[in-house]
Image (cartoon, rainbow, N blue to C red):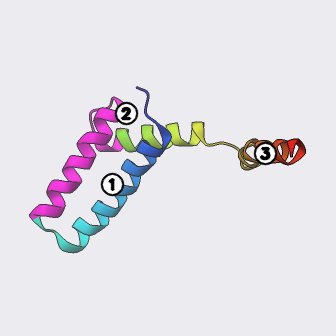
Amino acid sequence: MLMARPVLKNLLEQYETLRALHAEQGSKESLRRLEDVSYTLCVSTGTRDIDAALAAARHRLAATAPAAGQHRARHAAPKSAQALAS
């Protein structure tokens, strides 16, 4: 399964937030929302249970995380090139 990094990261953040919300409130609404995001995580990661989905999502995010130096260098290059061209 291919999943854009920001989307997958957002799903994980939603899951963590909703899990805490449901633990605090225990309402039917918080449970429904938690189940919805859990289902979406499972579908997005090609898994059948939330524990496997969380592990797969975290693994994919770790594998696609740019190294801090590479990320900065990639974004700094165009600015330097623009400054030289001016």
Q: Main secondary structure of the magenta part?
A: helix
Question: Residue 9, percent across and down?
Answer: 45, 48
Question: Residue 19, percent across and down?
Answer: 29, 61
Q: Is residue 80 above or below residue 13?
A: above
**Callout in the foreground (3, 1):** 3
Q: Neighbour class for label 2 at 10 Å: few (<14), some, many (≥20)?
A: many
Q: Secondary structure at mark 2?
A: helix
Counting residues from the start of the chain, the first of labels 3 and 1 encountered is 1
Give, as a three-letter code, the residue at label 2. Answer: Thr
Rendered image quadrant of residue 54: top left
Q: Which label belongs to residue 15?
A: 1
- For disc 2, the marked residue is 45
Q: Neighbour class for label 1 at 10 Å: few (<14), some, many (≥20)?
A: many
Give, as a three-letter code, the residue at label 1. Answer: Tyr
- For disc 3, the marked residue is 73
Residue at 44% x, 28% y: name it: 2
Residue at 36% x, 38% y: name it: 52
What is the residue that sits farthest to the front in this orientation?
Answer: 86
Distance from Cα at disc 3 to Cα at disc 2:
31 Å
Closer to the camera, 43 or 74?
Answer: 74
Residue at 78% x, 45% y: name it: 73
Question: Residue 66, percent across and down?
Answer: 66, 42
- Which residues lie in the magenta part? 28-52
Give, as a three-letter code, the residue at label 3. Answer: Ala
